[in-house]
Image: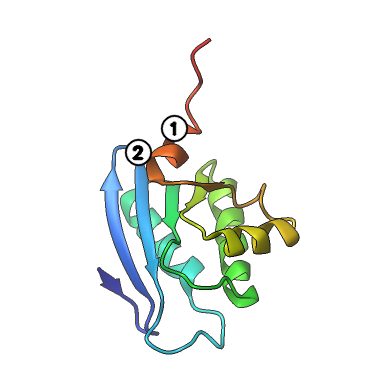
Amino acid sequence: MLDTELGLRLDVERGPDWIFVRVNPPEGSWDEAPPLAEAIWAILEQSFTYRVVLELDRLPLLRSCLIGQLVMLAKRVHSHDGLLRVCGLSSQNHEVLTASRLSTVLPNYHDRGEAVMASRPRPR
């Protein structure tokens, strides 16, 4: 587990060609935007891998400040020809992304395996 200076807790696993990051909710509340984009970007740069699956199954509610961080990270990852996938969103959080018209920017998958396989060509 990686704890950042501002209380952000991340579980990080490295796989072949991918980084998996589980975002854990803070002890208190996120009233301001957490430095999620910067923290994850630092992990990606250290590993020289720009393919990341964010596991958000532990987050009770996606708030606008957190969604902004996810969009910022997605843009940064895409600018380096990388991939950002989200998995484990609750149905309520998935609806939040859909209502925000961000479901294409932050594609949601059931689990990390599905997220990784979505980037591979399907057999005919």
Residue sitting farthest toward the left? 1
Mark 1 element type: helix
Q: Is 77 placed above or below 73 here?
A: above
Tell me if residue 114 can be seen. yes
Query: Which image quarter: residue 73?
Result: bottom right
Q: Which residue occupies the foreground of this view, 44 or 10?
A: 10
Q: Which residue occupies the foreground of this view, 53 or 40?
A: 53
Q: Which residue occupies the foreground of this view, 73 or 97?
A: 97
Residue sitting farthest toward the front? 91
Local crowd size for mark 2, using a 10 Å CA cut-off: few (<14), some (14–19), many (≥20): few
Q: Quadrant of the N terminus?
A: bottom left
Q: For the residue marked with disc 1, what is the amino acid?
A: Met
**Residue 22 vs residue 110: left or right?**
left
Q: For the residue marked with disc 2, what is the amino acid?
A: Asp
Counting from the top left corner in percent of width and height, residue 108 is at 55, 49
Q: Which residue is mark 1?
A: 117
Q: Earlier in the sequence, mark 1 or mark 2?
A: 2
Marking on residue 17 = 2
Counting from the top left corner in percent of width and height, residue 121 is at 50, 21
Q: Which residue occupies the foreground of this view, 48 or 33?
A: 33
Mark 2 element type: loop
Seen at 28% across and 48% down, the residue is: 14
